[in-house]
Amino acid sequence: MILIGLTGAPGAGKSLAAEYLKRKGAIVISGDDTGREVLETYPESLKSLVKTFGKGILNPDGSLDRKCLGRLVFADSEKLKKLNSIIHPYLLKLLKSKINKYRKSASRKLIVVDAALIFEWGIENWFDYILVVTANRTNRIKRLVNSGLCRREAENRIGSQIPQSKKAAKADFIIENNDGKIALRNKVYGLLKKIKS
């Protein structure tokens, strides 16, 4: 069993790389999906968020308005720290239990954790290999804007994480993603052969 931590700066294309790994039979655990599950698994986490940020972060039905919370925290580093201090302990607990579950039951040889904050969480030692997907800043901003963010929100997202160069410096493998989806797919498949051999 090989456990890979897949990370990269916002807009670099790590989740697309994860999708290509999944197509080749890897089990992919999404950090984003795990973050969403935190609120269902640990209802007290939502209460803590409301206590910290106010009822304005809720939808009319009482669920979390993620876009509203995102705009709030990515524009203010202190608020982002507060959010992280509430959510991350629950998230890491859930992530660890998912990895352990797949390790026990999986017949497949590769588990990939697709998560933006592997280095920020300090969990890089969980993995056999760290794969960092990189892209130039222009492409990253363009992709984030195409996903629905305004330019300022895209800049805030990028600024909220440790710089791409520092992530790349800590990687076992780096895949550059500036040349389109087919080029990225080919690089991912090539790396997978290398890892398996």
Image: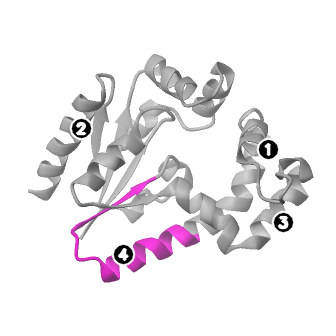
Where is residue 35 drawn, in percent x and y?
60, 59
Which of the numbered marks, if any, corresponds to residue 185?
Answer: 2
Cβ atoms under marks 2 and 4 closer than 8 Å = no
Per the rendered image, the range of residues in magenta is: 93-114
Of labels 3 and 1, earlier in sequence is 3
Q: Nearer the viewer, mark 1 or mark 4?
A: 4
Of labels 3 and 2, earlier in sequence is 3
Which of the numbered marks, if any, corresponds to residue 102?
Answer: 4
- Residue type pointed to by label 2: Arg
Of labels 1 and 2, earlier in sequence is 1
Q: Quadrant of residue 180?
A: top left
Disc 1/disc 2 C-alpha distance (Å): 37 Å
Of labels 4 and 3, earlier in sequence is 3
- Residue type pointed to by label 3: Lys
Any magenta on residue 66? no
On screen, 139 above or below 128? above
Which of the numbered marks, if any, corresponds to residue 79?
Answer: 1
Q: Is residue 93 left or right of residue 179?
A: right
